[in-house]
Image (cartoon, rainbow, N blue to C red):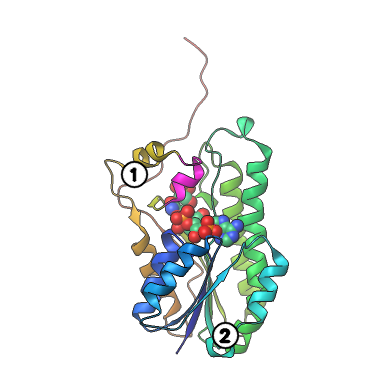
Amino acid sequence: MPSVLITGATSGFGKAAAQRFAKAGWSLILTGRREERLKALEKELSEHVPVLTLTLDVRDSAAVTDAISNLPESFLPLTCLINNAGLALAPEPAQKVDLQDWHTMIDTNITGLVNVTHAAMPLLLKTGAGASILNLGSVAGQWPYPGGHVYGASKAFVQQFSYNLRCDLLGTGVRVTDLAPGMAETEFTLVRTKGNQAASDALYQGTTPLQAEDIAEQLFYLATLPAHININRLEIMSVRQAWSPFAIDRDPK
Ligand SMILES: NC(=O)C1=CN([C@@H]2O[C@H](COP(=O)(O)OP(=O)(O)OC[C@H]3O[C@@H](n4cnc5c(N)ncnc54)[C@H](OP(=O)(O)O)[C@@H]3O)[C@@H](O)[C@H]2O)C=CC1
Ligand SMILES: O=CCS(=O)(=O)O
């Protein structure tokens, strides 16, 4: 039975991915900080597949390394790592942002992702052909927008790190993909606005955002491609989202 390690399985894409992989019979290693949510998901899915939950903050490099290097044998070989844990904060312009919010995004989206990757790589290398590292990037890593500042830059890191990993992992059989979604309805905007439910609802209202299940389906597709195929980057948007014209600063009339 193949096994998948999913970071940020307590909500959104991570939770939907856990449910999608469980449906196909994969063993699940699920992580996140909110233990009660992990336990609820374990209860739901362990009726069908083996589930191991690890209450972990990806920013804690020692805890991440310890947990992943001591996975029970029954959850090995590890076939897929989904580096999904992440967040955006501070939608306001860069000049108004609290520095701590920038640090939190860097520590989670960059340091957290490399912590987990470094810890899981020996296991994925042992698995070899057919193994995958699926990194959650974002359209924000490729396309700038106001208020994107450090969030977008952290996702640009994810893209380039994914490409560079591919270079180093060439010949090992381990695939690496930067999966870059656009607007998707999860708890993402609630977190970004620090709990402003009305702002979150307003963003998704009157349109058709991607849903967590759409991304889970892409993750499952990527993880189950024939072993000789590597999709380097997969950018996916709702048909109701696209780019805007360049903004121009004009003299007052
Ligand atoms: N929704 C969107 O529009 C898009 C999202 N993305 C990216 O997809 C990923 C998932 O986001 P999404 O599902 O939308 O958002 P959610 O807020 O719904 O889920 C985020 C998950 O990340 C976990 N997480 C956050 N910080 C940490 C941490 N320090 N340690 C461990 N886990 C953490 C949360 O778990 P817990 O709080 O329990 O720790 C939660 O399970 C993120 O990387 C995001 O940047 C990319 C493109 C579009
Ligand atoms: O990564 C999240 C999607 S967006 O907010 O940057 O469009």
Task: Kindly give the residue lying farthest to the top in the view shown.
Answer: 253
User: In front: 247, or 139?
Assistant: 139
Q: Is residue 192 magenta?
A: yes
Q: Residue 204 carries which label?
A: 1
Determine whether the residue tagged by mark 1 lies in a helix, strand or loop: helix
Evaluate whether residue 139 shows in this view.
no
Q: Is residue 86 left or right of residue 221?
A: right
Which of label 1 and label 2 is nearer to you? 1
Evaluate whether residue 83 shows in this view.
yes
Determine whether the residue tagged by mark 2 lies in a helix, strand or loop: loop
Mark 1–mark 2 Cα distance, whole angstroms, equals: 39 Å
Q: Where is residue 77 in the image (x, y as percent from the top left)?
A: 55, 88
Is 98 placed above or below 38 here?
above
Extent of the magenta region: 187-195
- Residue plotted at (42% across, 65% down): 15
Which residue type carries mark 2?
Answer: Gly
Which residue lies under the disc numbered 2?
173
- Near mark 2 (Cα within 10 A), the count class, few <14, some 14-19 or many ≥20, is many
- Near mark 1 (Cα within 10 A), the count class, few <14, some 14-19 or many ≥20, is some
Q: Is residue 204 magenta?
A: no
Of the image marks 1 and 2, the number of the one nearer the N terminus: 2
Q: In this view, does 211 lie to the left or right of 59?
A: left
Which residue type carries mark 1?
Answer: Tyr
Q: In this view, does 63 lie to the left or right of 190?
A: right
